[in-house]
């Protein structure tokens, strides 16, 4: 018998993005926070499915970027950091998951 545990990362294993992190990304993007969030989520699905980050951020900022652009790198780093706070309750549930018996 196979036992599976399927988990989502964003807001399941990780905590929600802190508002100050979102504001920091909006500042990097030179957009007000409301506009930034609208564009960030409008284009996020394709990005989460593998769209290159320079194309994603180009959609969010409505401009073209090439791979390796320093602003893209800064936005990538800020975005990653914003999702990097782990939820202790979720981690505890993962630790308590049923274990497969040793063969």
Image (cartoon, helix red, strand yellow):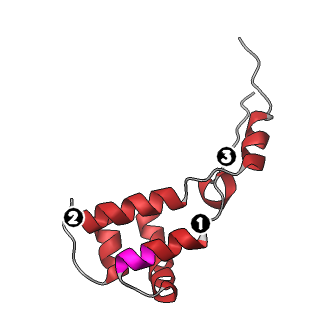
Helix, strand or loop at mark 3: loop
Specify whether residue 43 is in view. Answer: no
State yes or no: residue 22 in magenta: no
- Left or right: where 50 falls relative to 41: left
Residue 23 x, y percent position in the rendering: 50, 76
Cα–Cα gap, marks 3 and 1? 22 Å
Q: Contact (CB < 8 A) between labels 3 and 1?
A: no
Q: Name the residue rendered at 71%, 30% in the picture.
A: 2
Upstream in sequence: badge 2 or badge 3: 3
Residue 41 x, y percent position in the rendering: 50, 76
Cα–Cα gap, marks 2 and 3? 35 Å
Q: In the rendered structure, find residue 69 and report the number of the disc placed on it.
A: 2
Helix, strand or loop at mark 1: loop
Q: Name the residue rendered at 39%, 58% in the picture.
A: 77
Q: In the rendered structure, find residue 6 and report the number of the disc placed on it.
A: 3
Q: Name the residue rendered at 81%, 34% in the picture.
A: 96
Task: Decide which of 45, 23 is in the foreground and name it.
Answer: 23
Specify whether residue 85 is in view. Answer: yes
Residue at mark 1: 17
Q: Quadrant of residue 29?
A: bottom left
Q: Quadrant of residue 4?
A: top right
| Circle 1 crowding by C-alpha within 10 Å: few under 14, some 14–19, many from 20 | some
Task: Give the vertical position of 103 relative to 51 (above or below).
Answer: above
- Considering the image in quadrants, where does the N terminus appear? top right
């Amino acid at each position: 018998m196979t036992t599976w545990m399927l988990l989502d990362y964003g807001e399941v294993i990780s905590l929600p993005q802190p508002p100050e992190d979102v504001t920091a990304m909006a500042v990097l993007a030179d957009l007000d926070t409301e506009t930034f969030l609208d564009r960030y989520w409008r284009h996020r699905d394709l990005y989460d499915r593998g769209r290159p980050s320079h194309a994603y951020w180009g959609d969010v900022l409505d401009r073209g970027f090439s791979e390796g652009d320093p602003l893209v790198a800064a936005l990538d780093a800020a975005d990653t950091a914003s999702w990097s706070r782990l939820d202790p309750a979720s981690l505890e549930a993962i630790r308590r998951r049923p274990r497969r018996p040793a063969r």
